[in-house]
Amino acid sequence: QVQVVESGGGLVQAGGSLRLSCAVSGTHISPSGMSWYRQAPGNERQFVASIILNGQTNYADSVKGRFTISRNIAGNTVYLQMNSLKLDDTAVYYCRAMILQRQFWGQGTQVTVSS
């Protein structure tokens, strides 16, 4: 059974940094791609960043230059380094793993940016 578990969320002041982690377990197949999404109260879930097996990354315009997505060599853990955090970055951050054209989601980790 594939499991996706996020960690690293918390409370941080505006301008600060956080590093999120997402680990995939329960499969020997490396995800073909892993992504971060976020959802603020009252808003739809929105794309943040993604990385595929060849290392190619993609970012939402709102986080370009501030967030960096990376993964471990095995490809089953992905990180999101978030710098220069803004109040608007407050949300629940979700990790999605694509494995054999199926998507698996984690339960999310809360990121709260305070002024």
Image: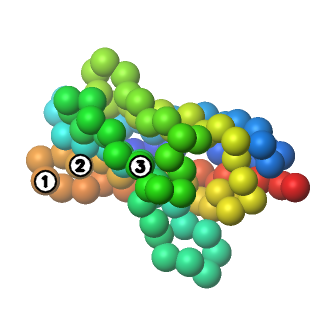
Describe residue 26's horizontal placement relative to residue 79 as left or right: left
Above-or-below relation of 66 to 102: above
Name the residue tied to disc 1.
101
Rendering coords of residue 43 (x, y %):
56, 78
Between the residue at mark 3 and the residue at mark 1, the CA separation in whole angstroms equals 21 Å
Describe residue 85's horizontal placement relative to residue 52 as left or right: right
Above-or-below relation of 59 to 19: below
Locate the C terminus and report the quarter of the image it occupies. Answer: bottom right
The amino acid sitting under disc 1 is: Gln
The tally of labels here is 3
Name the residue tied to disc 3.
59
Secondary structure beneath label 1? loop
Question: Which is more toward the observer, 78 or 29?
Answer: 78
Give residue 87's quadrant in the image. Answer: bottom right
Name the residue tied to disc 2.
98
Q: Please identify the residue farthest to the left as the structure is shown.
A: 100
The amino acid sitting under disc 2 is: Met
Q: Is residue 30 visible?
A: no
Residue at position x 49%, y 36% in the image: 68
Describe residue 13's horizontal placement relative to residue 1 as left or right: right
Rendering coords of residue 94 (x, y %):
48, 55
Question: Which is more toward the observer, 62 or 51?
Answer: 62
Residue at position x 28%, y 21% in the image: 74
Question: Which is more toward the observer, 69 or 95?
Answer: 69
The answer to whether mark 3 and mark 1 are in CB contact below 8 A is no
Rendering coords of residue 113 (x, y %):
76, 53
